[in-house]
Structures are given as C-alpha cells and as structure tokens.
Image (cartoon, grey):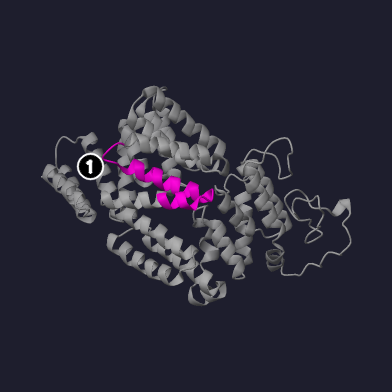
Amino acid sequence: MAAAAEQAAHAAARLQAFSDAANFCRWALEAQGLDQPQQPRARAQLLRLHAQFEQLAGNGQDALRTIGLLVDIARQHGYTDLLLEAARIIRPTHLMGARADPQVSTILEDALRALPEGANALRIQALSQLSWIPPYALDMKRSKELSAEAVALARQRSEPGSLVVALHARLYALGGPDDIDALLAVTDEMLRSDVSPRTWVSLEALSARHTALIQRGELVQADAARAGYGHLAREQKWPEAIWSHDRLCAQRKLLEGDFAGAEAAIGELRARSRRLRLSHGAALSGIMHAALTIQRDGPRAFASRWDTSHFSLAIHDAMPSVRPGIGRLCASLGQHGPAKSVLESMVGDGGFALPKGRARNERAARTAASARTRLLCVRALAARTHARPIAKDRTRPAGPSDRARRDVGNELARSSRARRQVTGAERPRAAAKRPSAANTCAPGMASPNRIQCRSKDCPACM
C-alpha cells in the first residue's frame, strides 16, 4: 500500500499536481506507520518527499512541520545527507537565503561537523549552502571564503555535480559591485558545463547574468540574457520560471514608463500566480503594483489607496534587500520612525547587513535619517568593501567600488530635503562666503553645519 501511494505521488508530481502528490505521500506515511519493524531510513526518505511536495504545492507551514519530523529522525540516526536535503527544501535557492533562518543554519552547521574533511560531496554541498545562509551570508568576506573553499574542493573531486553546486553558491558570494566580472565568468562556466538537455543550472546562470549586466548598465546584453532565460523556461515547460521571466518583462515596462502595459502585465501575473499557487506570487505582484502606483501617481496617492499602517510593524520582517525601499517609502509617507530604524539597524553591525549591489546601497543611502546615520552608512559601506574612503586616490584608477561609494556619498550630500523631512525642521541655508577649513565636508558626506560647503576640493560637493 505504501509503495503504491508513493508511486502515485511521483506520477502526480510529473503532471505538476503537487497538492495531489502531497496527499498521496500522506497516505503512504499512514500505511508505512503500520509496518513492523519500523525502518527509520525509509521513513525519513518518505518524509523528505512529502515535505518537498508540500512546499511545491504552496503549503509552507505544513512543509516546515514535516521537515521537523525529518530532522529529528536524521539527527537521531546520523543521516547527514537527509539533513542537507531538509535544509535545501526550506531554502532551495540563494534568492530565498538572505532572510535569517536559525533552523537552517543549525542544520547545516550540524551536518558540517559530522562530515569528514576533504573533497567530500556532502561537505561541498554543506559549505556551498552555508555561504548564502545568515549569519554567514551577511558577512561578505566569510561568504566568499566558504564558497571559495567549496569550489576548490569540487575541483579536486573532478565530479560535475559537486562543481555545479559550488558554482551555484558562488553566484551569491560574488554579489558585490567589485565582483561583476568574476560573477560573469562563473555564469559562463555554468553555461558551458550544462550540456543538452539544459537544466536549472543554465536558468540560474542566465538569471544571475541578467542582474549583473543591469548593474553594469549593459542593457542590450541584459535583454539578451533575459530572452535566453525565457526561451529556456518555455522550452522546458517550467511554469514558475516562465512566470519569473514575465515578471522581469513587466518590470522593464514599468521602468520604461509604459504604465498601461505594466498594469495589464501585473494583473495577469497576479491571476496566474493564484492558479499556480505560488507562495511568493501575491507578494511580488503587490510590490510591483505598489511601485507602479508610486511612480505614476506619487506616494500620497499610494497611501490613499493602500493600507500602509503595517509597514512600521513588518518592516524588519522583510528581506534585507527590500528594507531600503520600504524605508524610503515610509519616509515619503511621513513615517519617519521606521525609516530611521531601518538604516540604523542595517549599519549597526558594521555594514554587513547592507544589501549587496550598487543600486541597493544607493537606496539605503536615500533612507538616511540624520547626519549621524548618514556618516554610519558611509563608514559601513567603506568597511563592507574593505577599501579606502571616498576621497580620491591618484595612485590607482577608480574601480567599481570607488564609483559606488562616490555615488553614495554624493547622494547623501544632496539629501537635504530628506534630512529636513526626518528632523522636522528647516536648516538655515549656508552663507555665500567661502567656508572655513573647520566647516568643510567630511569625505563622502555633507558638513553637519551646512547643507553644502561648496568647496571645490570637497568630494561631497563636486
């Protein structure tokens, strides 16, 4: 009976009927519970399958309960491979890994301690996933070290599957503005290794390539990567990947100012996500519709149509990469307390919680609430990139991190209007006379005594 129900679950999953597959797995577990003697390994494997189908069916809470049962058995009997499988079900991709989950990090740490040293496939998998799970994911240096170790072990092993896992994790570790070239090299290697028929490996590589090219401003190449992503998703008939591609297309319409086309696309995406039962579909569609309303009608119009009272309560539950945008929106709606708390929490740990990427750091800068928090932001960004301050260095050419930090500094220096919003008071305008040396701006930020010192040698005022 248990074997027949498990076969039915696999058949339903091949038809994308994941709710039916989860029900068949539940029947298999009930039938297996009547078997004597109990076989813990078979029980744990069936629990893993059940959790996987529950997650794919959009029943995240049920999947977490099933994962708890699986982890208990795996720890009791030393099934390290199933511990790693449990962590991968909860956090299947680095796109979901930025949000802290102590359960996942503990599972991976336990597995790593139990595994032998050396080029072991399970050790490579554990190191790879740990590199993009907080708290390790919030420390760029540590994240790079873990993923680099995984790649080195995978190359020693000379086994394609392990190398693919390690390179996939490398996509997250190389998320900073100085790492775009290295990231593109990783995507090239992933695409070369993924021979026909192409798999999710190419999909992940094309997605990362699209983002990196946008960050570098190469929109033609980015469009080509996005088109390749969509072609592969439709070729392999992957519904969620097709939905993700169409979401990127809708975002592009929004950025181009085609508000009517973007609104129609967002509505279609929302309806399709309900049919597919995508757990994240409603949230992502809602964010896009909110961005459309703000860009087309302004933040006040957005506040009049949407309930924004929950922002101040839920802002710290959002993923770190989303918080700067929510904080900026709160500031524009007069919710200055949440806007200030977002930046202070992000720079309170030395900048490791700052989101990766130049554009996201610019958004973080624009949420600055006071001269003190703006200075913290610049210091944290400098510490994060392990480089010198924004002041020009004539001995070497400017690199991506220099430009990113300079842009942040200039953005902070120009944010007098946001500064007045947060403090609630108008600052007196600076006198027209040339400022004294004591009142010139610190590198990368405006003087606290002036809106702009306008010194020809001040990097904040150039």
Q: Amino acid at mark 1?
A: Leu
Residue 122 vertical position relative to residue 216 in the rendered view, above or below: above
Q: Position of residue 91 (x, y in %)?
A: 39, 45
Q: With 382 as the anchor, is 173 left or right in this view?
A: left
Tell me the quadrant of the picture where the C terminus can be found: bottom right
201 inside magenta stretch = yes
Residue 399 figure quarter: top right
Res. 129 in view: no
Q: Secondary structure at mark 1?
A: helix
Q: Position of residue 456 (x, y in %)?
A: 81, 53
Residues packed near mark 1 inside 10 Å, few (<14), some (14 to 19) or many (20 plus): many
Residue bounds of the magenta highlight? 195-224
For the point 51% across and 56% down, which residue is it? 322
Q: Which residue is mark 1?
A: 46
For the point 37% across and 41% down, which residue is it? 87
Residue 228 vertical position relative to residue 187 in the rendered view, above or below: below
What secondary structure is the stretch in magenta mostly built from? helix
285 inside magenta stretch = no
Q: Position of residue 214 (x, y in %)?
A: 50, 51
Nearest the eye: 227 or 241? 227
In the orientation shown, which residue stands out farthest toward the front?
220
For the point 32% across and 67% down, which residue is it? 271
